[in-house]
Amino acid sequence: MADRQHETSSISYHSAPPPTNKPKRNYYAFACSTMASMASVLLGYDIGVMSGAVIFIQKDFQISDVKLEILVGIISLYAIIGTAAAGRISDWIGRRYTMGLAAAFFFVGAILMGLSTNYSFLMFGRFFAGIGIGFASLIAPVYTTEISPAASRGCFTSFPEIFINVGILLGYVSNFAFSKLPTHLSWRFMLGIGAIPSIILAIVVLIMPESPRWLVMKGRISDAKRILDRTSVSIEESQQRLLDIKLAAGIPLNFSGTDHDPNLIPPLSNSTTKGESVWKELFIHPTPPVRHILIAAIGLHFFQQASGNDGVVLYSPRIFEKAGITSSDHKLLATVAVGIVKTAFILVATFFLDRMGRRPCILTSVAGQTVSLATLGFSLTIINNSHEKVKWAIVLCIAMVLSNVSFFSIGLGPMASVYTSEIFPLRLRALGVSVAIMANRITSGVVTMTFLSLYHAVTIGGAFFLFAGISAVSWLFFYVVFPETRGQNLEDVEKLFGNFPWRMKKSKDTTNIEVELRG
């Protein structure tokens, strides 16, 4: 019996239940996930638009490269404040209204940036935009995970990454569209028009339902049941999801409270779900599964950014300039191509996540990214050390930028939102995802605030060799740490963690030996 249990655990770590030929889709859940993921456009637009806007900001304000990279990267550090607050706020006021706060902060930030008259004013505007991005970065993946049925969760929870890429593409298009304006107007229009996605998001929030898992946490069982009935592929699945959520939230299975039920027993009354206890359970006295989950989540977000993706996307005009493209129009047009490729391949990822599984997608993605970054470093080194144009190296450089963003988009990009938001148990989800995204934003801030200084210090080719090395290390990390979660109910995912492959193999082998000796 023990051998059979270990064998089952070993299989579930690496694989998932075989997919059906055509997973059932719930179009209401699809619509809800789409609307929530619009929050991610805010982050994407800022990344895309700043890549081109900085060209004109630097000309207008006559600032150094150091000030420029601080301006670009500081928003990731500001976003940490929003992310840190969003976990607790979303547990307090709900997932839906937290999205409204994200829209409000980014709207104010976009207007302030568009009206900026100096560098300090611009930094002030980026503070508000960063808070909004922090809220959006947390709440979009959490909401889509909690609203999605298990069969479609990989697809639906990749939507935030899709909309990040849509935002990046819109930012690139905005750069190209306004680049013909006078310098002092071009970047102001590029940044100020970012208020439009905020307005759209605020309108969308008004028609979205609340997360059923948040409603259960508040004891609003009947409201949660109505939403689960609409977002599940069958009544049986809806009932099972409700039971699983009740178990995870610590609510009696026979409890069917309403908003006005005097016997309301929300899980927040339980000491295990109070803020202080959640912190203790996550950081001070974590169980082996929770420790494993935390390592996987923080590691995923760290490596996603440490491999240099934001550096490539934000500084792509500078990379193309180093590759020999000197015309501003051509550089901005090349970035539009980057945005189109990123968006196209993230759509490919939505098709494979629920069919191939999480592990194959991320391992393929990181392997391809590693080769692309190393080859990009090689081509840029050839260009840097040549006194005349080396056409094949220029073509290779552009191809590797596109290859890098393609491989990133089919796995490592969407996996940060998909995987992190589904592995934390309900009682720890908001805080756990918040901590992981804080790690993401810190790493992104460090990369984007030091990218120009790094390539001045070790050459631009050397910078990408460094990113390739980090990417190679990340492949080993994902291979060792990540269990497969495809097809699992959210409340069952925690059971996949707590053991690493070599431990399970050793345990299985030991059990086999004991059985043979007894036999």
Image: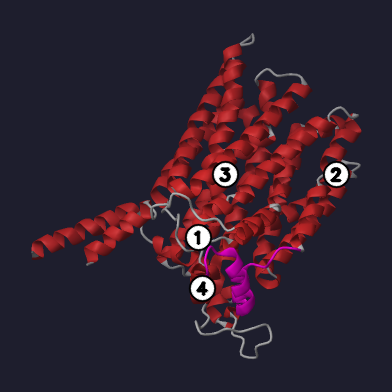
Residue at mark 1: 150
Residue 419 seen anywhere in this rendered image of the structure: no
- Mark 2 lies on residue: 192
Earlier along the polypeptide chain: callout 2 or callout 3?
2
CA distance separating discs 2 and 4: 46 Å
Q: Earlier in the sequence, mark 1 or mark 4?
A: 1
Query: Alpha-carbon distance for marks 1 and 3?
Result: 20 Å
Q: CA distance from mark 1 to mark 4?
A: 13 Å
User: Residue 306: percent from the left, percent from the top?
Assistant: 56, 42
Picture layout, residue 223 above or below residue 150: below
Asked whether, in this view, residue 207 is left or right of residue 447, the answer is: right
**Residue 373 visible in this rendered orientation of the protein:** yes
Of the numbered discs 1 and 3, the one sitting upstream in the chain is: 1
Specify start and end residues of the magenta stretch as a single range. 207-235
Which mark sits nearer the N-terminus, 4 or 3?
A: 4
Q: Secondary structure at mark 3?
A: helix
Question: Is there CB contact under 8 Å for labels 1 and 3?
Answer: no
Which part of the image, by quadrant, shows the C terminus? Answer: bottom left
| Dot in front, 1 or 2 | 1
Q: The disc labelled 3 sits on which kind of residue?
A: Gly
Identify residue type, mark 4.
Gln
Front position in the image: 112 or 175: 175
Residue pointed to by mark 3 = 413
Cα–Cα span, label 4 and label 3:
33 Å
Mark sitting on residue 239: 4
